[in-house]
Amino acid sequence: MEPDEYRRMADAESSHWWYRSTRELVRQEFTSRLTHEPVLLDAGCGTGATGAWLSSIGRVIALDVEQAALDLYGELHPGAELLRADVARTGLPDGHIDGILCVTVLYHRAIEDPADVLREYFRVLKPGGTVCLVEPGVRRLRRAHDRHTHAARRFSRADLVSLVRRAGFDVRRSTGAYTFLVPPAFLKSLIERDGSASDLDGGGRRVGRALEFIAALERRVIRRISLPFGLSVLVVASKPSDNG
């Protein structure tokens, strides 16, 4: 990721509609599956924009390979334990973690093989522990924002489910999200062509409020049914317990 993107994330995390909406989506789909006072891993945490709130329900280990991201995380969210490490080689003990949140990490070009990361998550989770993944969706959609954030891949819902199952997890929930953004994102990709831009630039407050409202309505739908695709895809899965 470009260095200035971390500062954009830090500056926007409390106000940008996507961060606010994604936090609410994760609350809805992830937290009800966690144990009381869990040990949580915010994996590939960045500046804490999507996962630092987890400290309100448990002990958080914030892990990232980039020191610049961890510095901003610690500055903004001093309650977490900071750990500089690769998500595929965390150095954490076997079965140490109750829950893992991983938001827009596996898509990155620094990840040689997402399967390696998922095997590591499986190793560090306790039996019965839960992982929540949110990754960019629609495989064939490539935009200027993807180049700006060093994206190497996007995932269909089936792609992500398959990866998770091959790592040994039991899938509890999978759905598309931000489905309403897919048509405008395709149009934006055609307009931008070979440009480079961050989705955190521009948009305006009115547009942000409207998108946040639509995302809230979509979450109500997701409570009841799984969406087949979306600009993001979410998978929640568990490590089988010792007693089966």
Image: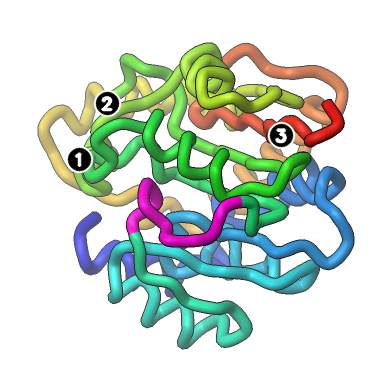
Residue 78 can be seen in this image: yes
Gap between marks 2 and 1, in whole Å? 8 Å
Pick the front one: 15 or 223 = 223
In primary-sequence order, the first of circles 3 and 2 is 2
Mark 1 Cα-neighbour bin, 10 Å: few <14, some 14–19, many ≥20: some
Specify the quadrant of the image occupied by residue 70: bottom left
In the rendered image, residue 202, in percent from the top left (x then y), is placed at 37, 55
Amino acid marked by disc 3: Ser
Residue lying at 58% horizontally and 78% vertically, measured from the top left: 80
Residue denoted by label 3: 238
Q: Is residue 90 magenta?
A: yes
Residue denoted by label 1: 147
Gap between marks 1 and 3, in whole Å? 32 Å
Q: Nearer the viewer, mark 1 or mark 3?
A: 3
* Helix, strand or loop status at disc 1: helix
In the rendered image, residue 214, in percent from the top left (x then y), is placed at 69, 37
Which region of the structure is painted magenta?
Answer: 86-94
Residue lying at 47% horizontally and 35% vertically, measured from the top left: 119
Indicate the quadrant containing the N terminus: top left, top right, bottom left or bottom right: bottom left
Residue lying at 36% horizontally and 52% vertically, measured from the top left: 89
In primary-sequence order, the first of circles 1 and 3 is 1
Q: Is residue 11 magenta?
A: no
In primary-sequence order, the first of circles 2 and 1 is 2
Whether residues under marks 2 and 1 lie with C-beta atoms below 8 angstroms apart, the answer is: yes
Residue denoted by label 2: 142
Q: Is residue 164 above or below residue 82?
A: above
